[in-house]
């Protein structure tokens, strides 16, 4: 197995309910797959914060090129404009860095739980 797993919708929903993202938050998924967890966080903000999902800033990193491209298409199809995607192994080469080349700080981090 390549270690890739789809996150069930129910799990993604529960995770967004637990982390409670808010408008203005920066949310990252370091192993984003098709970006389902990030999209669910966006749905949460849309539902609980008066349709302000465009004020949520999303960050994704994915090592698999095919899955990375699927996530990009997924974001485009959902009309997401406030996101940054990177393609590389996030453990070996994290690419979301600040101006001083240190890991960025995020308000929330979501990742697929180990199934």
Image (spheres, rainbow, N blue to C red):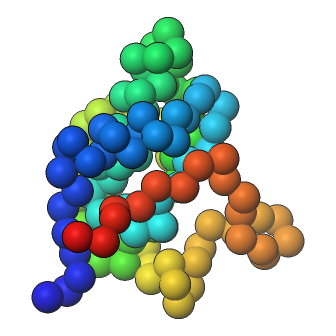
Please name the residue shown 21% across and 42% down the image.
10
Q: Say whether residue 47 is left or right of residue 58.
A: left
- In which quadrant of the rendered view does residue 40 lie? top left
Please name the residue shown 66% across and 47% down the image.
107
Q: Nearer the viewer, residue 47 or 24?
A: 47
Whether 2 is drawn above or below 12: the answer is below
Q: Quadrant of the N terminus?
A: bottom left
Residue 102: percent from left, percent from top: 78, 74
Please name the residue shown 71% across and 71% down the image.
103
Residue 66: percent from left, percent from top: 22, 71
Q: Say whether residue 78 is left or right of residue 53.
A: left
Residue 34: percent from left, percent from top: 26, 57
Please name the residue shown 30% across and 45% down the image.
12
Res. 75 visible in picture? no
Q: Say whether residue 9 is left or right of residue 48.
A: left
Residue farthest along the right direction in this orientation: 100
Whether 4 is drawn above or below 2: the answer is above
């Amino acid at each position: 197995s390549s270690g890739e797993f789809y996150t069930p919708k129910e799990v993604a929903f529960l995770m967004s309910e637990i982390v409670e993202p808010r408008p203005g938050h920066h949310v990252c998924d370091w192993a984003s797959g098709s970006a389902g967890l990030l999209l669910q966080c966006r749905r949460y903000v849309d539902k609980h914060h008066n349709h302000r999902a465009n004020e949520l800033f999303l960050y994704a990193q994915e090592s698999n090129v095919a899955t990375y491209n699927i996530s990009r298409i997924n974001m485009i199809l959902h009309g997401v404009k406030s996101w940054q995607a990177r393609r590389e192994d996030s453990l070996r080469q994290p690419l979301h860095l600040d101006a001083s080349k240190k890991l960025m700080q995020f308000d929330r981090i979501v990742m697929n739980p180990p199934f």
